[in-house]
Image (cartoon, rainbow, N blue to C red):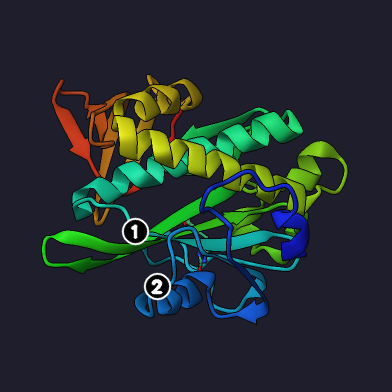
Amino acid sequence: MLPERVRKCLQTDFFGKTILRFHKVTSTNDIAKELAAKGAEEGTVVIAETQTQGRGRIGRRWVSPTGGIWFSTVLRPDMTPTDALKLTLTAAVAVARAIRDTLELNAEIKWPNDVLIGGRKVCGILTEMSTRGQMVDFITLGIGINANVDLAAFPENLRSSTTSLRKELGREVDRERLLQALLEELESQYKIFVQQGFGQILKEWKSLATFLSSYVEVAVYDEKISGFATDVDRNGALLIKTEDGIIRKVTSGDVILQRH
Ligand code: BTN
């Protein structure tokens, strides 16, 4: 991955103005967090070819072999920590759109922020934050895209639910070009979110989220909630109508699509 190729003709005001590229790191979120704590500007991007301790949501490990797009961005939004979930959904819209527009693949979103192609996960998003008083100080938005990765590098239990862009396209993806398109899309969605609010983003998110109105099971800590995914509310929480007709609101967890 060559930062100068990503930056060439990059049409953004601040996303990717500074790009730091590493061969191997623990996690790009760790590096971005260190830089943010030292005052790195909003939009600073950290990319790595591999991560030795890539992190996923809910304390999971994120497998990060070479060939992927593993990066984190520093954001400094003026918002409360509860609004961070909305930012994660905003990023999922940007990833799905960039993949659709650049590669013409049918990328879809699974709540809250997995990007899937043909029901298989191709991208995950992890937002971590640091707070100051009641407000967000900075956010490290970490995005992992299985671009040209070898799926044999993934543990066997993940292979059937995971895909790569290379597998879906039958050819290598130009990672620099995709990252450039993604940074442009991220900036444009982020500006819409900050300037116009979450409503517009949520509309777009819903049009890309194909699992809505399906029967789902969500693992929330030790509990499993099953029912119809009826909607996502204005804060980004998933609403599930259970068999007894009660609407349960879920703000964190993992959705499993069920046959019913
Ligand atoms: C998930 O779906 O569980 C989220 C995965 C997020 C992975 C990315 S790769 C770049 C950044 N660095 C990390 O350690 N995690 C995120």
Q: Position of residue 157 (x, y in %)?
A: 60, 58
| SS category of the residue bearing label 2 | helix
Q: Position of residue 93 (x, y in %)?
A: 49, 35
The residue closer to the viewer here, 20 or 239, is: 20
The residue closer to the viewer here, 66 or 11, is: 11
In this orientation, does residue 223 appear? Answer: yes
| Residue 143: mark in rendering | none
Rendered-image quadrant of the C terminus? top left
Disc 2: CA contacts within 10 A as few (<14), some (14-19) or many (>=20): many
The residue closer to the viewer here, 239 or 18, is: 18
Is 81 displayed left or right of 192 in the figure?
left
Residue displayed at 58% across by 59% down: 17
Is 113 displayed left or right of 250 in the figure?
right
Quarter of the image for residue 130 reads: bottom left
Rendered-image quadrant of the N terminus? bottom right
* Residue type pointed to by label 1: Arg
| SS category of the residue bearing label 1 | loop
Q: Position of residue 2 (x, y in %)?
A: 77, 64
Is 141 displayed left or right of 15 in the figure?
left
Residue displayed at 48% across by 52% down: 125
Q: Position of residue 10 (x, y in %)?
A: 67, 48
In the rendered structure, are the residues bearing label 1 and label 2 in contact, judged by CB atoms less than 8 Å apart? yes
The residue at which mark 1 appears reads as 76
Residue displayed at 32% across by 64% down: 138
Quarter of the image for residue 165 reads: top right
| Residue 36: mark in rendering | 2
* Residue type pointed to by label 2: Ala
In this orientation, does residue 163 appear? Answer: no
